[in-house]
Amino acid sequence: MKGKKPRAFSRKEQSPPRAKDSGGARFSELAASLAEIGRGFHARGWALGTSGNFSVVIQREPLRLAITSTGLDKASLTPAQILEVDEAARVVRGRGRPSGETSIHLAIARVTGAGAVLHTHSVCSTVLSGLYAAKGGVLLEGYEMLKGLQGVTSHEHREWLPIVENSQDMARLSQTVAEILAQQPGIHGFLLRQHGLYTWATELAEAKRHVEILEFLAEVMVRSSALGHRG
């Protein structure tokens, strides 16, 4: 009796299944979230014109960030305008040019272990950075809103918000930021003088909340100063 002839497999059956591009899917999800946050910050007056830049860590080893391209109107920010950069701020995904401040985002992610970094340019944070520059920072205490910061459980918390002298030398500025963060590991943000606010957190949603908390408190401090209650 003749044996059965082996069944021929189709090309589709012979080929192993393709692995899903999980990295691409994650990048797309994060890009959509950053674009939504950028539009929301513009609507609240925290990222007008082309100001502000926002990033989230895609992976740690090697370090990769999803970050906004430079020179964009945040009112119409789209996921297609988000780039992926490596630890040297080189673009590895997307079209566009990353902000010169990408090195600051990378420094914050490295030193603090943050999963997201957000930078705004509100009127109040800019004014506050000038008002308190001579003190080297702003002490925030006694406010219930402080409990919105990661790890803070009481209004009695004392939050120090350093003020860093602004510079167009981004290599030097990012090094200064890294040194400050290493020396003051418990802080949740800092101000660049006459520039704006930087804050971060483990997750993007938490970083967004930190922006809301610190921008609220910046406005409280500026309004209090205008009424003669400067700390």
Image (spheres, grey):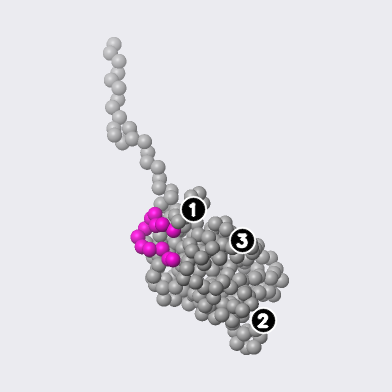
Task: Tell me where the magenta segment starts and ends, as one range.
Answer: 89-100
The tag earlier along the polypeptide, 1 or 2, is 1
Among numbered discs 3 and 1, the one appearing first in the sequence: 1
Residue 231's tag is: 2
Q: Identify which residue, 122 or 8, lies in the foreground.
A: 122
Residue 112 position, x and y percent, is 58, 59
Q: Position of residue 120 (x, y in %)?
A: 50, 72
Residue 65: horizontal and vertical position, in percent?
46, 57
Q: Is residue 224 magenta?
A: no
Farthest residue, direction bottom: 227
User: Does residue 187 appear to the left or right of 28 in the view shown?
Assistant: right
What residue is shown at x 51% (from left), y 51% (from top)? Answer: 60
Q: Is residue 213 visible?
A: no
Q: Which residue is mark 1?
A: 63
Of tags 3 and 1, the one toward the viewer is 3
Residue at 57% across / 58% down in the picture? 111
Q: Is residue 133 above or below residue 151?
A: below
Amino acid at the residue labelled 2: Gly
Q: What is the C-alpha distance between the residues marked 1 and 2?
A: 40 Å
Residue under the image location 31 percent in, 36 percent down: 12
Characterize the local packing of mark 1: few (<14), some (14-19) or many (20 or more) Cα atoms within 10 angstroms: some
**Tags 3 and 2 in contact by the CB under 8 Å rule?**
no
Residue 31 found in image quarter:
bottom left
Label 3: how many Cα within 10 Å (few below 14, some 14–19, many 20+): few
Mark 2 neighbour class, 10 Å CA radius: few under 14, some 14 to 19, many 20 or more:
few
Q: N-terminal of the two: label 3 or label 2? A: 3
Q: Nearer the viewer, residue 157 or 16?
A: 157
Q: CA distance from mark 3 to mark 1?
A: 19 Å
* Residue at the extreme right: 156
In the picture of the structure, the residue carrying the numbered disc 3 is 182
Q: Nearer the viewer, mark 3 or mark 2?
A: 3
